[in-house]
Amino acid sequence: MAREALAQAEAGQLDPALARRLSNDPLAPWIGYAALHRNLSTADPGQVREFLDRYAGQVAASMLRDAWLQELDRRRDWKNFRAFHAADSSASLRCADLAARLDAGEPDSKEHAADWFSDALAVWKNGDAAPADCDAPFELLDARGKLTPELRWKRIDAAAADANTGVMRSAARGLPPDQAAQANAYAAFIDAPNDGAAGWPKTERSRHIVAIGLARLAKHDPGAAEARLSRLAPALQMDDADRGRVLYAVALWTVGSYLPGSAQRLAAVPASAFDARLHEWQVREAMTRGDDPAAIKAIVAMDPVQRNDPHWQYFEARLRERQGDAKAANALYAQAARTATYHGFLAADRLHQPYVICPLELSATGADRAQVAATPALVRALELFQVDRLPWAEREWKQAVSGFDDHQRQIAVALAQDAGWYDRALFALGKDAPDELRLYTLRFPINDVRTVQEQARVNAIDAAWIAAEIRAETGWMPNARSAADARGLMQLLPSTGARLARALGIAWGGAETLYEPLTNIALGSAYLRQMLDRFNGRTYLAIGAYNAGSAPVDRWLAQRPQLDPDFWIETVSYKETREYIARVLAFSVIYDWRFEGKAVPLSERMLGRTVTDAQKKRFVCTPAPSPPPTVASGSTDTTQ
């Protein structure tokens, strides 16, 4: 009945009798919200107030109040706006709040003037593109002499940091003519860098603007940014910090596409400008050239925390092994192999060791579960999920878990999973409590097992791989839909689904067919098979093509045909695809553990090789003792 009532309310046809019958239903607030929200333009303030009072503190009330305030803003009904505004209202309404308080005369009130001007100046200094509601408050600030040149420049500087040149020009209008001309020149440079900047005042601001503009230019033309920097840096006496910002961007956007001169541009970046991202690209660039010593040097230059991540422990080990230092390599492999990660599994393969997985299982009494399950916000969240109101359900979920301790939050995830809301484990576990990553049963759910296994058999591919793709794509959410219109468990585009359905003789009822789990898995598995055949059985390439398309994979293969699979994956240009391939391969190991308790070695799976049951990997919880990692003789590393 609640589903029917929500549909009626959203259509403006709510049956009063049905509404009364559901007055105590967990979804009563949302039925009321839907009815009021549909007619906010004609809503009576008394009706809104009654709803807000009845459901005070609930998500539905908060959302309705913000929508109502936006409606009052549109009406310029400042009296009611002031009556309904609250401290926790949306930040987007801050200009409307200032306008309402201006209408109430606060700037001329001894009691409120100081607060009003303080709040208005805070909005001014922020540098955001302000809505029209801020025009009148800003005009008053100007009229009262509050917008000094110093404050105008603060707004210009804040806007420049975000390359918001429209706000820069707007703030410049009240400056003295010479200063306004300079501010507009700054905005013009950020939009289109030019050599006229050489004649600017040699100030910190001028140098900073040049750095901002050239860093933006480097994103689409690193060569032009580099050339212009060589002319402007001496003229403006730019220091290492501002030069470094530009050289960083030049190097990053060069090496990200493996353009000629990548190594030289990386070498030109001052050490102070390097961050974790650029260190990683320096390693990848050296890998593509087969320059193992340079790649090792780049890893050694990393911050100790970054260098000691299993990711870079593994690649340092690979590189040192290729340089003939087996002792250092094995020590690093041993450290990485202690983790249940993509690189940890690869390291275990290099050492011919079993995989380390130390699972945790949620332990909760019936009373514990009942207590969490009775939480009103969680009840509403799960009910909303069942009636396909996911955005509302997610808002209620967020409110519910904000009041839980770690154990209660884990129970909530289990309850959501019982209801088929599988992706809560992806968003609610492990962020603030790393040990929760070991809750593998919750984090790697299994649904539609028979379909997965049947399609694995039909398409002669690995069931764990299919499950891993589903987990990586949607977290087992059958109604998922991407911004690109990919749909269903395995995120297929309607055009791809229709083509595959025709080829396979599967009934096709349009794009909505992709929301049927059995059909989606059948089509998605067939597509995996096509990609596998397309790339001669190399699973890692098929995974990359599933994510990015076959054309980029062809291009990357042509650029770097000589690289081993693990090095090739690491040097994929697209961050999303690079991480996706690694994630799916690692997830395949976890699903092997869930399905069978033993796994196809990851290094064999990535190549699509068939292994016997005897060749499959065992899982252990406690890894063999290993020495701390050592480094090759002659290394300059001093972090050990």
Image: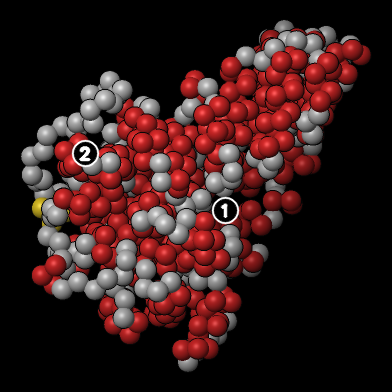
Toward the viewer: 336 or 79?
A: 336
Give the percent coordinates (x, y) of residue 4.
52, 70
The residue shown at (52%, 56%) is 559
Residue in front for this viewpoint, 52 or 240: 240
Identified at 52% across, 29% down, the residue is 267
Question: What is the number of the mark on residue 325?
Answer: 2
Secondary structure found at label 1: helix
Q: Quadrant of residue 107?
A: top right
Side (left or right) of 473 relative to 347:
right
**Is residue 233 left or right of 515 when viewed as pictured?**
right
Q: Camera-side residue: 189 or 274?
A: 274
Location of residue 538 by image quarter:
bottom left
Q: Amino acid at mark 2?
A: Asp
Q: Where, quadrant-wise, is the C terminus in this rendering?
A: top left
Q: Is residue 240 visible in this depiction of the protein? A: yes
> Which residue does the image show at 53% across and 22% down from the upper left?
270
Residue 190 shows which numbered tag?
none
